[in-house]
Image (spheres, helix red, strand yellow):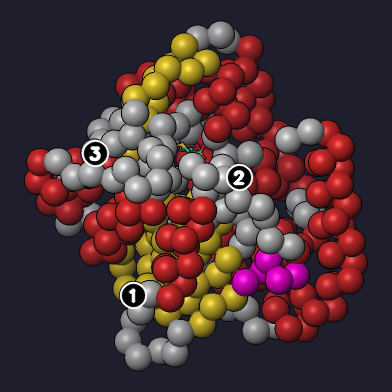
Amino acid sequence: MKLSNRIKLGLTFFIWRVINRRAFEEDFLRILPNTLKDAARLIFYRNFTSEEKRIAKSIETYRSSLITTDKILHSFSSPRSGTFKKGNNDHAIAGPYLANTSEAHAKTGASMKGGILLRRITTGLAARTVLELGTNTGFSGCYILSCPQVEQLVTIEGSKDLCEIADRNLRQFSDKYKLMNMLFDDAIDTLSHNDDKFDCVFIDGQHEREATWHYTKRVMPLLNNGGSIIFDDIYWSDDMNQCWKEICMSLDFSVTVDLQLKGVAILRLGEESKMFYDICEYVGRPRIFRKGW
Ligand SMILES: C[S@@+](CC[C@H](N)C(=O)[O-])C[C@H]1O[C@@H](n2cnc3c(N)ncnc32)[C@H](O)[C@@H]1O
């Protein structure tokens, strides 16, 4: 995006915030489940605590070192809308396996704001066991591992190149992780077979509507009662946004929260009434990033 457009967008969001501060506090934050209030505050006020700044600083140091190495790495890119196919065992076919620079991969990984948001969501939900679909170079994983209550992160990545880098990245933070160098469906088969359970799943790969639904349905049985799914890039493409809207309508979840950068869906336990909270009404709705994809 051009600098002038970025400034215009930043200014628009700033004005929105000034006008909507009271409505945000009284109409949105007051009724939002307590577990997600800190995450919502980050999006509205854009303030980081000194602990968050310290954590982000050490994570961002590794990103800088990745940007300066000009290695070519392979990863599974997100396929175009409507191209979803299944192969053997009803497994999804991954997107194209493409080469790109380490700099491009480092920039694909969770940004400081996205990472701290993930940290606040995971901490708010008190998730002790987390499953991530899409490790990439491990940035989101580092932010998850920095949550004090997290006891184990299982993270899945199909690219061997990226797993080697992610392993070095994650190891700096903690040894409480298991990195599975497998395709998502193969790894989910293994986890299901072992009867592994998680409090929270973060879906951040193969961004396409049907693929996202496929993995959502597959990880649901791995969730503990009342567990949650965090969806990344809900405004990435029209198709991903459509998927998010369907998730918000789905009776599988009792609570869905649009946090602008990510969507959170809490699994239904019983007969609770369905609630949907949308922060974009108070901070502005992002434009679809890849229109026509
Ligand atoms: C958007 S990146 C993940 C970014 C990371 N979560 C972060 O925020 O730092 C998506 C990753 O998922 C991996 N991926 C996509 N489809 C996959 C599949 N079907 N099986 C395994 N890995 C896959 C890609 O190789 C890519 O590295």
Outermost residue, front side: 292
SS type, badge 3: loop
Is residue 260 covered in magenta? no
- Which residue is found at the position 75% from the left and 70% from the top? 282
Pick the front one: 266 or 2: 2
SS type, badge 1: loop
Q: Label 3, on which residue?
A: 93
- The kind of residue on which mark 2 rests is Phe
Q: Taking 206 as reference, is 287 above or below it?
A: below
Q: Label 2, on which residue?
A: 289
SS type, badge 2: loop
Give the number of the disc on residue 80. none
Confirm or reject: label 2 Cβ below 8 Å from ligand 1: no
**Does 38 sit left or right of 78 as displayed?**
right
Position in image of residue 138 (x %, y %): 48, 33
Disc 3: CA contacts within 10 A as few (<14), some (14-19) or many (>=20): some
